[in-house]
Amino acid sequence: MIKGVCSTTLKNKPFLIIPHPFNDELFSSWLTRVAYAHHFHPQTFINLFFGIKNRGLFKNNVDAHLSDQMIRNIENMVHNKINIFKLTLRSFSGILREDDIIDSPSIFLCKLRFCPHCLKENIPYFKYQWKLAFTTVCIKHRCFLQDVCPNCKTPLNIFKMYNNTLSFSYCSQCGFDLKKSPTKNIHSKFKTSMSAMDIFHQGLYQGYIQLGDSIIYLFCFMDVVTQLSKLILSKRNFAFLHTHPLFLLLNSAIKKTIKSSQPIHIQLNIVENFALFGLILYLFENYPNNFAKFVSMNHLTHWDMIRDLRHISFWYETLVNSISPKYVAFGNMVTNEEIKHARHYLLSLGKLENKANLTQLFGNINFFNKYQLHR
Ligand SMILES: [Zn+2]
Ligand SMILES: [Zn+2]
């Protein structure tokens, strides 16, 4: 491959050869294949077509960071025949996150993963799902994905080439053929947990998931997934989950010190992420009973369930409230007037105006002591 050429003649010029992207191909994978088709090393290709000043834009998670301006440039360079935005992970903005992915790329994105068997099929390429933290296994080949070279343990960098000769299906550090990586198959007892991953993928495609009768935007659900990850691993609420077979796979993760400053999935390996995401979706099976058991067996309060959420969706607030009602911390938020009306209301229903009935009406347990009520 041609490397180390300095010239400005190709800058912003249309590409000469334009391979068609696969349906599920990641932008960086496609761009690397474009470079190979031109017989350029990918880094040289970027320097020549976009200018050395812009090469920094193609580092650090380019699939989530590619700017609108650069997307327009590239679309011009391919004669507007390819929707470049759709190849980037920014196309999940408003689906995976309410905001643009560019603003919070670490939330559910991970190091690039791969399935050795998929790389063997036809032309090797990298799929966009392999950058998403919840994609931990290849459903087609029923094996765990991998995110480092099995020989030298280096993470993948598909813009680099070993010896300037081997393509991205070889490790850029040691030249190991990634297609020959030994694979870890999914044990039969975890096979149903693989369908959990499908729920996330379907959610990406549809923009929502369905739980019981509720239709929930995926980004609302993902906020709750983050909250539950913290409750399980940082706050160590294992009751109800500890008997599930997946919990065994979390053995080493529960011994780790989980930092609150980083997304939890970044601190776990692929098998541990498989277990964690599988267990979280298990909480939404038999909806809402499993979730209710998790909350009550771990003695979690309304506040525990919502404390780290920036925005609480109506669906989640209603769900949590039905299991662990909101405690009103300041008794004087309910006025004497309200108490008076509530007592009349209870009498009109033929009910006792006692503490239990008022608590049910107001959702509060403590402050009725000051009122003289029938027992
Ligand atoms: Zn595969
Ligand atoms: Zn290697």
Image (cartoon, grey):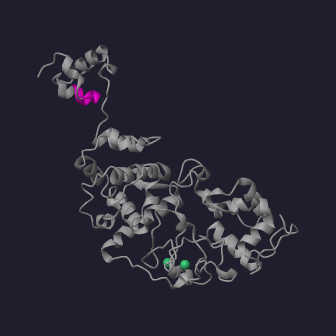
Q: Quadrant of the C terminus?
A: top left
Give whichever of 364, 272 is nearer the camera. Answer: 272
For this orientation, the residue located farthest to the left is 375
Residue 240: x, y in percent?
24, 56
Please indicate whether residue 156 sits to the left or right of residue 356 in the image.
right
Q: Give the quarter the ligand 2 occupies.
A: bottom right
Can you tell which quarter of the image residue 196 is in? bottom left
Residue 315: x, y in percent?
41, 44
Please indicate whether residue 232 sits to the left or right of residue 140 in the image.
left
In this rendering, is residue 3 above or below 336?
below
Residue 116: x, y in percent?
51, 80
Residue 49: x, y in percent?
80, 67
Instruction: Determine the residue positioned at 60% across, 84% down.
Output: 122
Give whichever of 203, 260 is nearer the camera. Answer: 260
In this rendering, is residue 215 above or below 18?
above
Can you tell which quarter of the image residue 350 is in? top left
The magenta segment is 358-364
